[in-house]
Amino acid sequence: MSDLRTEIVSKVLNSWERPMAEPFTMAPIPEELTIAENIFNFIHAHPSCTSNDVVDNTNVDLGRASATLLALYQKGKVDRKKYPNPNPDGKRDNVYVYWATVDKYSDKGVHRLIGKAKKPKKVKLTQAKSIEQDILAPLKEKLRPTYQMPRMPTAFNPEMFVQDLSLKDAKAVYELLKGYFQ
């Protein structure tokens, strides 16, 4: 046990007490590319490649590669075109070929939003509205009289009749009445 203590004191604790001769600097850490950057760089170097080409050459599984290709397409960094699947044993009838639309991954592309059309929100009826719609409306239809009494005419006022007419309409009425009174 004393050997371990001696080692700790002599090597670790004593090294803390020594002044540092040079300031501490970090060595540059090599940056690793993200999956999206890796796939974009492959597409930029190999235009007209398919998702299977990307999978074979970037060591990314098909699901992740497909999702990344879709994200790159939606961000506008790559573009695609649908072609018939050359593989007769393939699961899909069509495949996409991809090419880069920007020069670097850090450049911005035109955003494309792909999605389903939103469904209109269903209006929820309150209990009072549903009762009125389901019960009271049919009752009102049944209670409404089928025969309506004719409107009782009031005294005819020619001034009121002519007041609402335009000049063209008044002339048409004049021509019609002129035919009756000749």
Image: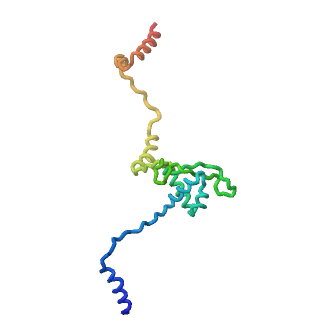
Q: Residue at x 32, y 80 (%)?
A: 16
Report whether residue 119 is seen.
no
Left or right placement of residue 156 versus residue 38 in this view = left
Please identify the quarter of the rendering in which residue 178 is found.
top left
State whether residue 151 appears in this view: yes
Most extreme residue toward the right is 88
Image coordinates for residue 80, horizontal then vertical, percent = 57, 49
Task: State the colouring used for the structure image.
Answer: rainbow
Residue at 39%, 25% (x, y): give it.
152
Quadrant into which the N terminus falls? bottom left
Most foreground residue, 74 or 119: 74
* Residue, far front: 21
Q: Identify the residue at horizontal 42%, vertical 16% (top origin).
A: 168
Residue 2 in percent (x, y) is at 36, 93
Residue at the extreme bottom of the image, as rendered: 2
Number of marks present in the image shown: 0
Check the image and report above or below for 140 versus 57. above
- Residue 91: percent from the left, percent from the top? 65, 57
Towards the viewer: 30 or 61: 30
Task: Name above or below for residue 143 compared with residue 124.
Answer: above
Near-viewer residue (12 or 87): 12
Query: Looking at the picture, how far across and down is residue 163, in whole percent?
Result: 35, 18
Q: Compared with residue 94, is residue 22 higher up or lower down, i.e. above or below?
A: below
Q: Hey, which quadrant is residue 3 in on the image?
A: bottom left
